[in-house]
C-alpha cells in the first residue's frame, strides 16, 4: 500500500513538473513577478536548464545581478 501511494505521488509530481516547464515564457515571467528576488535566486535558480534560461532573460533578475 505504501508503495502505491509513493508511486502516485511521484507520478503527480512529474505531471506538475512537466506542466510548469511547458508554460510559455511570458506566463513564467508573470509567476516570477509575484516572487521576491531572493526567492528567485535561492529557490529557482539551477533547478533545470530551461528555468535557468528563462530566469537569465527575466528583466528583474538582470537588474538584481547588476546591482
Image (cartoon, rainbow, N blue to C red):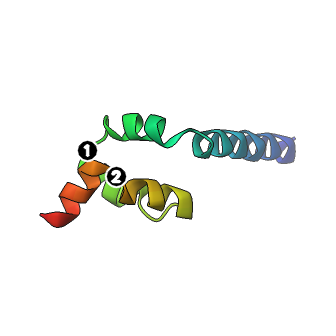
In the figure, is residue 7 to the left or right of 28? Answer: right
Q: Residue sitting at 17 percent across and 65 percent down?
A: 66
The answer to whether residue 13 is left or right of residue 40 is right
Against 58, residue 23 (above or below) is above
Q: Above or below — where is 65 with respect to 51?
A: below
Residue drawn at (19%, 56%), measured in percent from left and top? 63
Q: CA distance from mark 2 to mark 1?
A: 7 Å
- Of residues 11 and 24, the one drawn nearer to the viewer in this rendering: 24
Going by the picture, which residue comes out furthest to the left? 67
Tell me where residue 25 appears, x and y as whole percent: 48, 43
Q: Disc number at residue 36? A: 1
Residue occupied by mark 2: 40
Which of the 4 quarters of the picture holds residue 19?
Answer: top right
Disc 2, disc 1: CB below 8 Å? yes
- Left or right of residue 45, residue 67 in this image: left
Q: Looking at the picture, how far across and down is residue 55, in whole percent?
A: 39, 55
Amino acid at each position: 500500500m505504501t508503495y502505491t501511494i509513493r508511486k502516485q505521488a511521484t507520478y503527480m509530481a512529474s505531471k506538475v513538473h512537466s506542466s510548469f516547464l511547458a508554460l510559455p515564457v511570458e506566463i513564467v515571467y508573470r509567476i516570477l513577478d509575484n516572487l521576491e528576488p531572493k526567492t528567485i535566486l535561492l529557490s529557482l535558480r539551477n533547478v533545470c536548464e530551461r528555468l535557468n534560461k528563462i530566469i537569465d532573460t527575466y528583466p528583474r533578475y538582470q537588474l538584481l545581478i547588476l546591482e
